[in-house]
Structures are given as structure tokens and as C-alpha cells.
Amino acid sequence: MELSEHIKTANVEDVTLRRPFHPALRGTLCVTSHHLLFSDGKDEASWQLLILLKNIDAIEKSVEILFGYPRAVGSSGTITIKCKDLLVLQLEIPGMEECLNIASSIEALSSLESVTEMYPFFYRPSHLTLSSPWGLSSMEQYYKQTERLWDRWRVSTVNSDYSVCLSYPSAVIVPREVDDDKLIRSARFRQGGRFPVLSYCHHRNGMVIMRSSQPLTGANKKSCKEDELLLQAVIDGSKLGYIIDLRSAQQAQQARMTGGGFESKSCYSDWKRIHRHHERGKVVQESLIKLVEACSDPSHSVDRWLSKLENSKWLSHVHSALSTAGLVVECVERDGHSVLVHGSEGTDNTLLMSSLAQLILDPASRTVTGFLCLLEREWIQAGHPFQQRCAHSAYSHARLKQECPSFLLLLDCVWQVWRQFPLALEFSEALLLRLAQEVYASDYGTFLCNSEQERCAAGVKENTHCLFQSLLRPNIEEQYLNPLYEPTDLVIWPSVHPQSLQLWTGLFLRWTEYAQNMEEAREEVWSIVKEHREQAGPDRTNNMLSTHCDTLTPFENLMDELTIL
Amino acid sequence: MTFRRGSGLYLALLGADSWVNVALESCRKANPVMASAPIAPYNSSPLGNSSSPNASRESLKMEPLADVAMLPGEERVIDKDIIYICPFNAAVKGKVFITNYRLYFKNTDSESPVTLDVPLGVISRVEKMGGASSRGENSYGLEITCKDMRNLRFALKQEGHSRRDIFEIIFKYAFPLSHGMQLFAFLSQEKYEENGWNVYEAMEEYRRQGLPNSEWRVTFINKNYELCDTYPTILVVPYKATEEDLKRVATFRSRCRIPVLSWFHKENHAVITRCSQPLVGMSGKRNKDDERYLDLIREANGTTKLTIYDARPNVNAVANKATGGGYEGDDAYQNAELVFLDIHNIHVMRESLKKLKDIVYPNVEESHWLSSLESTHWLEHIKLVLSGAIQVADKVSSGSSVVVHCSDGWDRTAQLTSLSMLMLDSYYRTLRGFQVLLEKEWISFGHKFASRIGHGDKNHADQDRSPIFVQFIDCVWQMTKQFPTAFEFNERLLVVILDHLYSCRFGTFLYNCESARESNNVRVKTVSLWSFVSSDTSFYVNPFYTPESSRVLYPVASMRHLELWVTYYIRWNPRIQQQQQSPVEQRYKELLVLRDQYLKKLEELQLSDSAPSPTHLTNSSTPNAATPNQHITHLQTPF
């Protein structure tokens, strides 16, 4: 069935659009295969709203039928559109039939299942060409750039045809002394074939963060020699490593009944297991739903807002994520031991911990490029099932399948770090907001599919543009940069006290006046920064004695920063 | 060598996070909250400890004077060995020094310094804890309740009634007025370059607003406080109202607090006026003069309907009729509409803050933080005050004049007028303008600071005490949060103001009204807080301030957008304390210090250049002159 067959009414005139904090507008509504377009006039200067249909999470329609005259002139319908980026719109459409047609088109076209029918496969902007490289880096390139890995680690292409692990990339980094055969055997012992691979090697002490899925010990306590050897090779002589299991001890025990399990002390004697309970899947998705419900309660005098916020448990997920990431960091940085992180499948919370820990530990991952590379490595290549997790967002009435806002949770945690360390990250909140939007609905192919294998099969790299590439080229947009960025080599330990964690108002209360105020403030800060940077040029040469150039240079740098601040 | 921006700082900071080791220890014991320990390494800088200018100044002076930095006029009263029962660590042995201004504690038993520096004015209650026969370690001592969200406990030796003298001395010096003594502000000999008492001159401020004019006139009817003893001497009233009118209106307003102008909108000529409740009483009395007077306010700029904002909840206004008060009825005031703003009274606010203290001190309620916070209703009260002020500001900017009152017109009324003025007039958002605002709407118009705070008074359970001013400052803080570039001053100014609200070191917040301040000669005998603030303004400046003149700021007064002011209310908690300064501000401060050092260096270099000495060349290349390397290593040490 062609996409266009879903469209019974393509154009409606005299539609009224209502958005929060804007006056209502009248104009023309138009449905295409991938977009909803509203325009308030016919000339060039008209204001337009273009919404990706995929961004629409839920629609509600109400039809006013004049009593007894269902087709009478004057009957109209209202469609409420709730988007995955949390925007809510209302469209008043004259004519009941038109209204119902539009609604059914939106319903059909916003929930396309086939990847190749999605918009990224049709998005062809003039400034981008398909031949430009897709993605920022590969595992091989990462290995080549990271000299500290060369000695003890190697790139294995054992998964080059995705036969060892369906959700892993074709190349992974493993201990040099473990050969591919052992990897294959270890993979058979791990759920989904996700055997332990390197996620990060700490620049200061060479300790590593590994990640995997749970071992398949099962009820009769199976073991796997090769898996043990693999982990043995990771710590290589040093006496201790930590396994951070993202389930409670009880849950890990229970997992044995369904074929999963945990690394027993007897088989992995050099590894100390620490359990940290983390909610997953449906529970987290429901938290998001409750939170957004509380945030979009239209009554301004919401009583019991704080209780609602607490009951959504969203902030407690943020809290546990940051605490456990802190634990990983503590093991690596303070204690000087390597860490293996896993939960069950190793595709959600596991990635959350490994990437947050890197952000806290590694200054390189706090630049724009470094952060996007981190996301690419730890989420996209590592096989976070974006398509399943982000099929629906907070408004959908559809029955939950495998939705879970793991990635949103990551962005929220990063935001908390950013808020606590306003100087330490090179990127701004705007970048996080952009990513939060793109992950649910995008012009780009970056977040399509569930794994590299699926992206290969669908030809994503050949037929779509890469979001990360376009964010960085030719130059990163100013709004994505943090004007106050001041690189630091230090570990940035976030505080996780309940008083230190805050609701990410920028995202969850995005469509309010408050967001506008903050936006204006951000622009003002930028203009202060720019103004001073421009001034810094001529000032520099002003009646300064040339003999003291050396002294003056640091002084000027300082003044530069001071005026910026 | 080039100086990489800030690199020295970060290097120097590396050694400073020793707490992390402690945290890791607890991790090994499989403590579930172990990762909650990490805090910003930025904040581990020792700079963070001296978080106010006087603290750092004091710590410098401290050594020669047996560890107590004294203000001019400050005198030692007693020193004593004591154990400070720190709620965050174990008990700390040390010495306490009591002066006529402060309680200062310093530990003697360990390497890492533990100090307390508490102005006695902060103390609301001193109690004995345990008796001579109490069992258990540290069970005999003192418990001190403070007005600034903390309690202090000290233990002493049980032998020989060792606490008797210190208890009596603290009791006497913390509550001097109850013992026939003077507040410290009258004993202080501090000198500052600028005289802060000159910050606010009523005439000057009214002139700035464009007054007097053809609609509004200045009256001196109250020059001897004969019309109203809690009002200032200079008042602005409708041009058409005669002195006789004013006197007649005064008879119908509680405590003679007649409607007078607070703020004038230059473009649309709408005004904010303030007053107390009308004396309607049970019988529903009317007063033609009061009715006509309000109509004169309305007429002045041709407002069609004057809006009267009664800050109270409707029921409270009705209940006030029983005690002779009330509100403007529809029949009597036909050209006015009355709006109730539902803000609760001083007793409700006091209890609310007390509940807040319960959940944040000494230990923060962690498990159900948000719902416990909600149950204090503190943020809800903040919301009501802010949204009331927004309504006032909005009405005025739309061109309608308003009257604001509550019962007496010195608590909620001051909150509403000053907050709406802060929204409407960007002048009040400057460092100087904010001082003017406080001087005008709070101090000169008789917010009863002495009664609300209880300066020097031992009666801790006094029902007149209430944190109305703290609540106002919290509202200002909420606004600075929502408009980070709109205010010239920073959070630190707000904290310093609140600290000296209690300290009794400056005369600014003493007494209930201008007439009392005048008869006690406060302007002559005490120093103004603004003298102190002006002595180091760079400390209070918001680096992101962008002046803009004409915008009205409407904060979002929804619960969703209000935050607890953690860095004030929970600042005594060491974990929060370390985060107290925002990294941006702290960095700014560090840079200011660096700049001063460089400027000094530069000056020296220029001097050495201008001296036509043959040693000049060698001079600048010897190691003790400023070659950059030397210079930088030197600079690192202070951090």
C-alpha cells in the first residue's frame, strides 16, 4: 500500500490552530506522507508549522454534531495532537468528514512500522549529500586513536557478519590475549550473545569499564571457562575487579529460573559482585507517563504538585542512575579497579551506566564531538534498541510493548551534571533538547532501527543522513555550545541528594512561558560573551609595554575570561 | 610558556577532595548511599570556606588575637573549653569564645579545622540540656536554637556546675534588651568609606519616579509622626486631597495607615498605593472621606475601576470585622473592585518555616523529600505571594491604579508592593535600587522588624515573630532564578541581607518604624548594612546582568517552577555547603582575585619601567621579578 493511499483529505482550509502561549491562528492544514503542515496564509511571509507525523504520539478527536443533522453545515471537529516532544496542539477543522479523514490519516501515517518507509529515507536537503560519511567514528578508528589500548587490547571482528551477537557492532574491543574462539564461546554463555567488551579505558590508570549481558548460568549453575578466562584477562594480574550487577541480588537469583543468572564467586574468584537495583522497561516508561501527565495538568494551581512529581518516581530513576554511575567511577578512579557492568539484556541500564561514568570520568567525552561520539559508541553501535524503546512516548494510549525512555533518562542525567557543573561541558542544554526530540522523530537516520545489523540490512547508512554529522558540519551551531565552557581534567562527581536533583524543566516544561524566559536569558548571556570577545581583540594591543608581553598574555587571557563571565 | 586558562586552578584543586576517601570507605562497607557522597570538585576549593568577605577578613585577623577576629567595638567576655556536638560529624572538642557580638568556636582536638562563628543576634533560645546527674557522654550542656535554620548543641563537664557561667553570659548577651543592655549595633565602632544611611532619601526617590506632579503631591503632615506613628515623615498623596481629608481618612484606617503612594508608572500614570484595612467593624461602618479619598486615587489617572487587593483570604477579612477591621464593601466603594489574594497570616508562615526547618535540619529528609517538602506548604505560600504581586504588577502596567492592603499593612502589604515594584521597575533590580526598595517599602513604611525578628529579646515564643521578610527575600530569589540576567545583584547579597537581619551588627533592620529609629538615633549611633555592602560591591554583582529599562518581569508563579532555596535553607549541611557557591560565581570570584593580582603586578612593572635605571633589564629577567612562570606558580598557591 502506498503511503499516499492513507490520505483521503489532503487539504483543509479555515482550520484553527491553538498552541500553548500563542494566540489562535486560522489557516490551511495539509497532510503529506510524512508531515502535517499548517500555514496561516498563502504568501511567502506566512507562518508555517511543520510537524513530522512520526512525532505524533497520540491524537484525540471530538466531533460536534449538530443535533440530528450529522452532515449539516457548520459541524466541525477538533483534533488534539500530542507530540512525542511533549507539545500539544489543537486543530479545529470545519467539516466532520474532513476532520475524521485527517485524523485517520495521521493515525495510520504516524505509526509506520517499516523502517524504509520512514522519513529519513526521503529527506534530501540541498546542503547534504548522501555520499558524505555516515557516523562519526568506528570501533576501529576509536581503537586507533586511543593509544593506551594498544598494549593489552585488540579489535576483534569476530562479529563481522553479526552471527556471534546480533546486537553488537561488527567490531569490538577485547583483551589481546583472548582469541576469537573464546569470544564465540563466551557469547554463547551470555544473553543475546553480548559477551564482555571494552567500553572505556581510563586515561589516568588504565583501568577499564566493560559491559555485557547477564551470564546464562540457569537453574543448574552452568559455567563457561572461556567467559571466566575473558574476565580474567581483563584484570590481568591485578587482584580485583568489580562486577556491578544492575539488579538486586534477589532479582539476579530469580533470573536463574529463566535461564539467566550472575557470576558466582566460585567461578569468578577475583571479581567482587555489587548489586544495585534499577527499574527497567515498563516501570520507567510509566514513570515518564505519570511525570508528563503531572507536568501537563492544565490547572496552574496544581495542588500536590510535589507529591505528583515524587510519585512519578522519575527523579528516583535519575537518582539511581547517577548513583550507580558514581559507583562505577569510584571503583575505577578512586579504587583503581576495572569494572564489568551488566543487567539482564545489557542494552539499556548497562549503556546508561557506562556512558554516564565516562562523562563523569573523561574530559574528552564532555566536548560536543566527544559527547556525540560517546552516544554513537555506547548507544547506537552498542545496540540500544531505539526503534522498540522509542516507538511511543508519554501520551500514547497504545498498549506498551517494549517502550522505555532509557535514552531520555540518560539525557536527563547529563542535564543534571550540566546543571551542577555549568562550566564543565562544552555543549548546552539546547543540544540535549535537540537529541531528546530527534530520538523520537527525526529527519535523520541516526536513531533508526535496533542495531547495526538492522541498519545494515535496511541500508540506513546508504540512504539516510547522519544527525551527528550534520550537527557538527560545517560548524556546530552556536546555540548548541555552552558559552561558559572551561575544560577541566578533573572527575566531575555529581551530587545525588534529592535536593541536588531537579526536574528538567527545559524538557518537561518546555512549552511554557518559563522556557521562553530562560531562552531569552541564554541569548543575553551569549551576547555578553560575544560582545566581550569582540572587544578583547583591539584591547589587547592597547598601550601595553612590549617588554612585558609574556606577563601580559596570561593577564589578557584572564581578562578575556573574566569579561566573558 | 603560555598560561592555559585556568589550568593552574584545576591542578591546585586536585588535592582538595579528601572527603571522597571517606566516601569510598563507606562504599567498601557496602553502604547503599555511597555514591551520594560525590560533590563538585570545584567546590572543594578552600576559597569556598570563606564565603563572605567578613569571614575571610576575620580569619586573617584571627591569629594575633587568640583566634578571635574582633570587630571594632567588640569585646571578649568569656572563653571556655567545650564540646561542640556537631550533628554532621562526631562531637568536637574545642574552645568557645563569647564576645558581646558573637559566639566563636574552634576545635582543638584534630587537624581539620572546625569553626563556628555565630553572631549572638541569631540566637532565639538558649536552654540547658541534661542535669548534673545525667548519664551518658555529652549529656550535660547547652542547646542553642538559632533564627537562621540551625541549632547548636554544646556539652560541658558535669563537675562543678561548669555551664552555669557560660549559660548566663550567653543568655545575657544574646538578649541584651531583656537585660537592660544595648544591642551591639550601638557599640560597634566600625567605619566605612560610604555612609549607607544616605542610600535612601525619600524625596530623591519620589523625584526619580517623576513626583510630585499635577496628580500627586508630597505632604509633610506626618513630619512629627502625628498622623501615623508607623509611617515615614514624607508621604505622597492625591493632589486633590487636603491635609484635613488625610486626617479624617486616618480615623477610618487601622493604626491610621492611610492609602499613600508607593510607586508611580511614568507612562500610564497608574499607581500602587498601600494602606491598612478600613475600620468597618461588625456594624459595617462607612466613612465618606475614605470613600472619596479612594476615588481621588482612582481619578488621578482616569482609571475606570480602582482595584483593591486585599492580601488576606476572604474569611480572614470577614473575621477581622469582629475586631473592628474589615474590608471595602461593594456598596460603599462603587468605583472599586475588591480582590482577595488568599495569603495567610504571620502565624501560618511561622509554622510553615518551622516545619521546613524540621525536615532540613540537622538531617535532610531524604526518602520522601518532595512530599515532605510539600507538607510544609512553604513553596505554596511563596507561590501565593508571588502570584499576588504578579496580579498587582499586571494591573498597574495595564494602566489601572491599585490599592494594596492586608490587616495592618506592614507585612503582606510590604511583600506585595515591593515585589510588584521589583517586577515593574528595573531600577529596583540594581544593587543600589534594591537597597532603596528595602529602605522604602519595608524599613520606612514600618515593617515591624523588631517584633518579627525579636532583636535582643529573650521571649522566643513571642507570637509576633514571623519570617515575613525571609519569605519576601525568597520570592526575590525565585525571580532571580527565573530571570538570571535581569538582576544586578547575586544570591550572595540576599544571603548577607538575611544574615544581618538577625546579627544586630548594623542598624538597618532595627526597630519597628521610622519614628522609633529616629528617637533612638539609629542613623547616628549605628552603621548601616549598606555601608558594609558598598565596601565590596564586586562581591555582590551578578556577572550576567544585562541592564534593560522597560521590561516588566512576570515570573511564573506555578508550583512547577518554584524551587526550594537549598543554598539558604540547607546551607548548614556540609554537603550542601560545599555546593553553596555556584561554580560560575566561584570561578568569577577567583578570576577577580587573579585580576587584582595581575593588575598589581602590571603596576609594579610599569613603575620599574618608568624608572630610568640601568638595572632595568636585569631586573625584569631575574627570577624574583615577574617572569610568567614564577608568577603563575605563585598564583596557584592561594587556591
Image (cartoon, coloured by chain):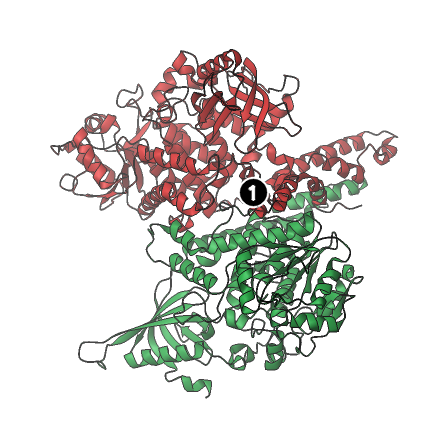
Q: Vertical placement of A248 versus B99: above or below?
A: below
Counting from the top left corner in percent of width and height, residue B583 is at: 59, 43
Q: Colour of chain B?
A: red
Q: Quadrant of residue A108?
A: bottom left
Extreme front residue here? A220
Name which residue type carries label 1.
Ser
In front here: A388 or A28?
A: A388
Asked if one can make out residue A46 in the rendered structure from this viewpoint, the answer is no
> Which residue is denoted by mark 1 in the rendering?
B582
Evaluate whether residue A55 shows in this view: yes
**Image quadrant where residue A252 sits:** bottom right
**Which of A433/B232 is in front?**
A433
Q: Position of residue A45 (x, y in %)?
A: 44, 71
| Foreground pick, B540 / A187 | A187
In the displayed structure, does residue B537 sit left or right of residue B399?
Answer: right
Number of residues whose C-alpha sits closer than 10 Å to that of mark 1, classed few (under 14), some (14–19) or many (20 or more):
some
Chain drawn in green: A
Quarter placement of the N terminus of chain B: top right
**Residue B351 percent across, percent down from the top left:** 35, 34
Task: Identify the chain of the residue marked 1, using the numbered disc in the image.
Answer: B
Element carrying mark 1? loop
